[in-house]
Image: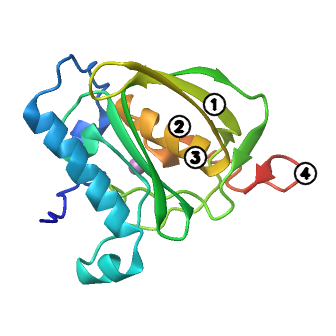
Amino acid sequence: MFKKLDIVDEKDSVLRNVSKEATFPLSQDEKKLIQQMIDHLTYSQIEEYEKKYNLRPGMGLAFPQLGINKRIIVIVHEVEENTFDNYVFINPVIISNSEEIIAAEAGEGCLSVNREVEGHVPRYARVTVEGYDEDGNQIRVRAREDLAIAFQHEIDHLNGILFYDRIDKNKQFYGEHEIRLI
Ligand code: NI
């Protein structure tokens, strides 16, 4: 049965801690929570369930947003209408990045930030992320565009950083000639 997650609000200091590495084997509770995160994020991106369960659409969550300072992230990326790729990364690390910088033109959102925050968040256009799957096998992904932004946003959560920390107060918006807007 679907269970809507209780997501920590930005005011909670748990979001400002640097999270600790997760250790293997993961506990049953951790595995259960990961599955609930996948379900929540998937349902939030399907209009019928988004309405039915009153969910805010989101593509990523990190453990600190559930009140747990462990280095675990989940991303549910819609690749075509109602078709999703799931990424579960334990102890993720960005091992390389593009020089090119991009930003989401409409700005970023976060399931812990229940208000509109305007401004462009500069991100690497491409990142390679290494980490472990739920069984402790090493995994690696090369992400680009919105998926690259999602990985950077979620890994920031593990380091106590929220997306608006990266909005330049003196330069909230960029032009197309400065960084590529997607
Ligand atoms: Ni977030």
**x and y percentages locating residue 60 in the rendered image:** 41, 50
Q: Earlier in the sequence, mark 2 or mark 3?
A: 3
Q: Earlier in the sequence, mark 3 or mark 1?
A: 1
* Rendered-image quadrant of the C terminus: bottom right
**x and y percentages locating residue 35 in the rendered image:** 23, 48
Is residue 67 visible from the viewing direction of this image?
no
Amino acid type for the residue under numbered disc 1: Val
Q: Which residue is under mark 2?
A: 152
Q: Secondary structure at mark 3?
A: helix
Q: Earlier in the sequence, mark 1 or mark 2?
A: 1
**x and y percentages locating residue 134 in the rendered image:** 28, 29
Circle on res. 127: 1
**x and y percentages locating residue 8 in the rendered image:** 22, 52
How far apart marks 2 and 3 lie (CA) works out to 9 Å
Label count reads 4
* Rendered-image quadrant of the N terminus: bottom left
